[in-house]
Structures are given as structure tokens and as C-alpha cells.
Amino acid sequence: MARKLAVGVNWQGKPDFKGTIEKAKIADAAGIHSIWVAEAWGRDAFTLLTLLAEHTSKIQLATSIVNIYSRTPAALAQHFGTLDELSNGRMIIGLGTSGPQVIEHFHGVPFNPPLTRMKEYVDIINMIFAQTPLNYEGKLFKLQRGFTMRFETPRKHIPIWIASLNKKSVEFTAKKTDGWLPVMIPINSLKKAIADFREIASAAGRNPRDVAVKAPGHVTVTDNVDRAKAGHAANVAFYAARMGTFYSEQLTRFGFGADVQKVKEAWDAGGSKAGTAALSPKLLSELGYIGGIEGAVERLKAQDEAGVDLHPIDIDASTPAEFEKTVARLL
């Protein structure tokens, strides 16, 4: 069976909507499983997903991720339901809590309690797509008038994938959702992390293979290795040093606490360049692969063996033919 590969859309920088659409068409034709559109504090994900739904036919479309604070559960259901209708049933719901930095200081919404909120969002979104009247008594949401959405989506259930890090949220993901979007798990720890995750699903009475797992790191095929590594390092350093405590605690749990401390101290003393320079090559290589096609294939094999179901990739190709040839090798 061929691997399932995923590609992403960058949320930063100057927009190139025409180019993004063309890349999506190429990915669609090449047999890529899904395209994931990020959302943080830049452009929204849903507008771009609308364009991609209109210009593709087979590839699945996903958010990577949208947070559960800036929109109500019903608003998210409206977005995803409309897009599922537009795309003929190709949507994947990618959700996460984000963190207090973004939620409180960009959206202006109190952050806590994230897990309770996630549980209620999943319940309510599933009820809406199932056309179950919204009579819901949660800790945060109390819905008592029995609303149902005024159109039926192509599917009574749209898959929900959760980006979760800490123990309780990972347990909820394994027990109640369709997919796990793990974050910053080093490749040498990934097999055990996925085995533990599937064991939770099994103990909850589920078939553990019914919950898919996306690899936490990208496999990048490029000749411009130095540029790609610089971008990778800058991203890791920013999340480790500046995006609250979730990501630094995650890396510390997996044995890279000393690296995190060095990055934070260097960033505080000398800014982003110093923080990025403080990252060890070992940590960077554990969190993603950047290089030629042969090494990329080996990394994908290692992720397969760890239990990964969906592999995010980046391909630095100059032509559609080169992209399709590289995808064929990776598949």
C-alpha cells in the first residue's frame, strides 16, 4: 500500500494565491493525500481552503490548525460544513488550543480551561453534523433550544484531528477523535509515543488503527539545504523560546531540556539569531529531515516503522514533472 503524503501551505510572507492554487493542482494530480492550511495570527485558513476546494478534485483539505477560542463551535461547524459541501466531502477538521500568548494577546479571550473547551467543541461539532438537535449542557456551553444546521453536509461526520501535547489531551484525542497531530516529538521517541497513544485507544474499546497519526516533523527534499535548515532552525527556536511553555516543556519531556535552556538564554541575551544559533544539530535532525531523495526515503521508512499514517513533506521542485517524479519516489 502506498504511503499517504501531505503538503502544507505557508501562512506567512507575501501572498501568491495563483501559485498556491497551481501547487495544489499539481499535488492533486500527483496523488498527495491531503493539503493542510495553517492559521495563526495572519491570514485565515478558510478563505484559502475555499479556493483550493474549487480548483482540486481528489486531494483532502484540512486546517493545520484552527484554534478553539476565536470562533464558536457552531461557527466552526458552519465553516467546515460549507467547505465539505463545496469540496464534495473532502474536509478534515484540524483543531488545537493554540496557547495563551495568541489567544489572550491576539484574540483577547481568556485561555483556560483548554481541555474542557476542546471536549465540548468536539461534542457540539459532531452533534451539528449528525443533525442532532442542540440540547447540550456543558461546563462552558449551555445550548437549550434544539437548533440544527439548516443544511445537511455530504457526511454525517467530518473527521476531527487534534493537535495535542500533554497527557490528558493526548488521552482525549486517542479516545474520542479521528486523528492525532503530535507536536515536536523527536524521531527516536516517536515509536514509543505512538504505541502508547494506540494503547490508550485500544483500552477505550476502539480499534487503535481507527485513529490516524500524522508525523510531527516534515521531510523536506531540496538541493538548497542550507536555506531550508535555516528556516527549520528559526521555527524551532521561536517555538522553544517565545511561544509560551507548552513546546519547551514538550521538548524537555523528550530529553532536550538542556537545548531548550540554551536557546532561551541565548534568545534573551542576543535575540532571534542568537537563539537559533544555540540549537544543536541533533535536536534539529530529530525534529525533521532536510536533504536529498535517498535520505528522505529512509526517513519515511523510519516514520512508517514508528507507526505514522500520514507523512508531511516539502518538495523544492522547479517543474510539475519534477514534483510528480519526486512524489512517486516517496510514495
Image (cartoon, helix red, strand yellow):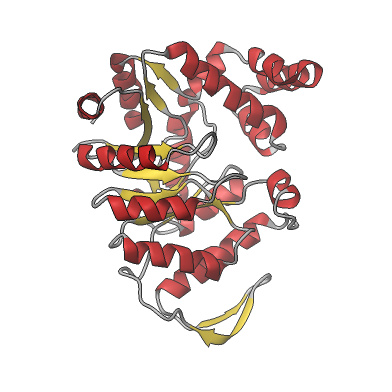
Q: Residue at x 33, y 20 (%)?
A: 296
Q: Quadrant of residue 25?
A: top left
Residue farthest to the right?
A: 269
Residue 66 rendering spot, x and y as whole percentages: 54, 52
Instruction: Compare residues 301 and 281 and report the one nearer the observer.
Output: 281
Question: Can residue 37 be seen?
Answer: yes
Would residue 228 be found to the left or right of residue 329 on screen? Answer: right
Q: Where is residue 42 shown, x and y percent of the image?
A: 59, 44
Placement of the C terminus among the 4 image quadrants: top left
Q: Residue furthest bottom?
A: 145
Quarter of the rendering containing residue 90: bottom left
Residue 161 visible in the picture: no
| Above or below 248: residue 57 | below
When the figure is inspected, residue 176 is found, relative to residue 42, above or below; the finding is below
Q: Residue at x 39, y 26 (%)?
A: 219
Q: Is residue 118 left or right of residue 30?
A: right
Residue 146 rendering spot, x and y as whole percentages: 53, 86
Q: How many numbered tags mark residues here?
A: 0
At 18% from the left edge and 38% from the top edge, which residue is drawn?
1
Front residue (pair 280, 198):
280
